Amino acid sequence: MIDRTTTVTAGGPTPGRPASADASQVVGALFVDMDGRRARYECYRTDCPCPVEGPIHAADDDPSDPTGKRHIGTSGLVAFIDGVKDQHLNTHHRSTR
């Protein structure tokens, strides 16, 4: 598997380098693996009550399907990616950004 993690630091993107725990530089990271169709969001704020959102995988069961046979698919993964940062900040940090 290829590591496609990119961390943004003060000097620019650094492929494959883990995110810094220093909240003054990096306060969160959204990890996306579209090859494996999965994602997770990690918050590095020291006061965060929910430091990890996800992980979510396109093959996870869809909670809205009563038969439990349907998976969330790529559209569910995209919805997670599109909304996780704003939802996390609004819910846990009372901030829009």
Image: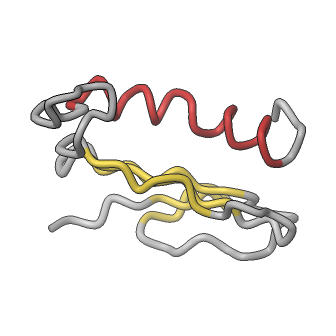
**Residue 35 image point, x, y percent:** 18, 47
Compared to 6, does 91 lie above or below?
Answer: above
Q: Residue furthest left?
A: 69
Tell me which corner region of the image, top left, top right, bottom left or bottom right, holds residue 4: bottom left
Identified at 27% across, 33% down, the residue is: 62
Name the foreground residue: 82 vs 59: 59
**Residue 16 image point, x, y percent:** 41, 70
Tell me which corner region of the image, top left, top right, bottom left or bottom right, holds residue 24: bottom right
**Residue 66 image point, x, y percent:** 22, 28
Pick the quarter of the image with the C terminus.
Answer: top right
Compared to 10, does 35 lie above or below?
Answer: above
Identified at 29% across, 23% down, the residue is: 75
Name the foreground residue: 45 vs 90: 90
Taking the image as shown, residue 62 lies to the left or right of residue 50, namely left
**Colouring:** secondary structure
Pick the quarter of the image with the N terminus.
Answer: bottom left
Tell me which corner region of the image, top left, top right, bottom left or bottom right, holds residue 80: top left
Compared to 4, does 30 lie above or below?
Answer: above
Taking the image as shown, residue 36 lies to the left or right of residue 75, namely left
Identified at 20% across, 65% down, the residue is: 2
Taking the image as shown, residue 15 lies to the left or right of residue 44, namely left
Taking the image as shown, residue 62 lies to the left or right of residue 87, namely left
**Residue 93 image point, x, y percent:** 86, 47
Compared to 89, does 18 lie above or below?
Answer: below
